Image: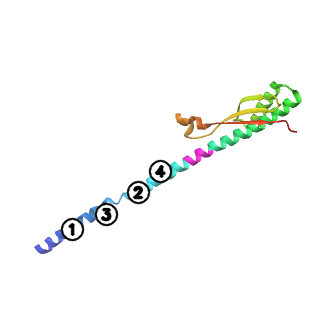
Amino acid sequence: MDEKVAVSSIRRSLFSPFVRLHRDERGLLVSFVIRFALVIALMVLAVEEGGQILLAQVHAGTAARTAAQAAANTFHTTHSQIRAQDSAVTAARALDPAAEVLGVVVNPDASVTVTVAETAKTLVVHRVGFLKDFGQQQATQQESVSF
């Protein structure tokens, strides 16, 4: 019987590193799944933030083009820069209420240049100091009269 105990203790000592190895692996899968889910969540957040910034740029460009066209048409019929500016602001707000007209310039050739700003609806970018500039998108468009 002493031989059986001795053989069994030798076997345990030989297999104990393997037993400890398997016992240490129990949390690896859960840890991997949690890390993987965190990486996927961060990637989804980055894509969503970038999409919102891109969408704000497209909206600003569209609002600037519409405002410049409206201002050019108004200036052509009234020859009033003030009415052209009012027309630009009204057209930009009608198209996109979040658009802010920053400037309207009537050029000597009767074309009008309009600058519009749009703030992106982001979750993170507008809260982080060095990223705030990415949340504010500007677009400048120049249009001539067309009917």
The structure residue drawn at horizontal position 57% and vertical position 35%, both measured from the top left corner, is: 132
Amino acid at the residue labelled 2: Val
Amino acid at the residue labelled 4: Leu
Question: What segment carries the magenta color?
Answer: 46-51
Q: Nearer the viewer, residue 15 or 70?
A: 70
Q: Which mark is residue 27?
A: none
Q: Earlier in the sequence, mark 2 or mark 1?
A: 1
Q: Which residue is mark 3?
A: 22
Is 112 situated left or right of 132 in this image?
right
* In contact (CB < 8 Å): disc 2 and disc 1: no
Q: Which mark is residue 14?
A: 1
Q: Secondary structure at mark 2?
A: helix
Amino acid at the residue labelled 3: His
Quote the CA–CA distance across marks 2 and 1: 29 Å
The structure residue drawn at horizontal position 82% and vertical position 36%, both measured from the top left corner, is: 144
Question: Which quadrant of the figure contains the C terminus?
Answer: top right
Give coordinates of residue 55: x percent, y percent. 66, 44
Q: Which residue of the protein is positioned furthest toward the front in this rendering? A: 109
Quote the CA–CA distance across marks 1 and 3: 14 Å
Q: Nearer the viewer, residue 118 or 115?
A: 115
Q: Secondary structure at mark 4?
A: helix
Residue 1 visible in image: no
Q: Earlier in the sequence, mark 4 or mark 2?
A: 2
Q: Which residue is mark 2?
A: 30
The structure residue drawn at horizontal position 88% and vertical position 27%, both measured from the top left corner, is: 78
Q: Which residue is mark 4?
A: 38
* In contact (CB < 8 Å): disc 1 and disc 4: no
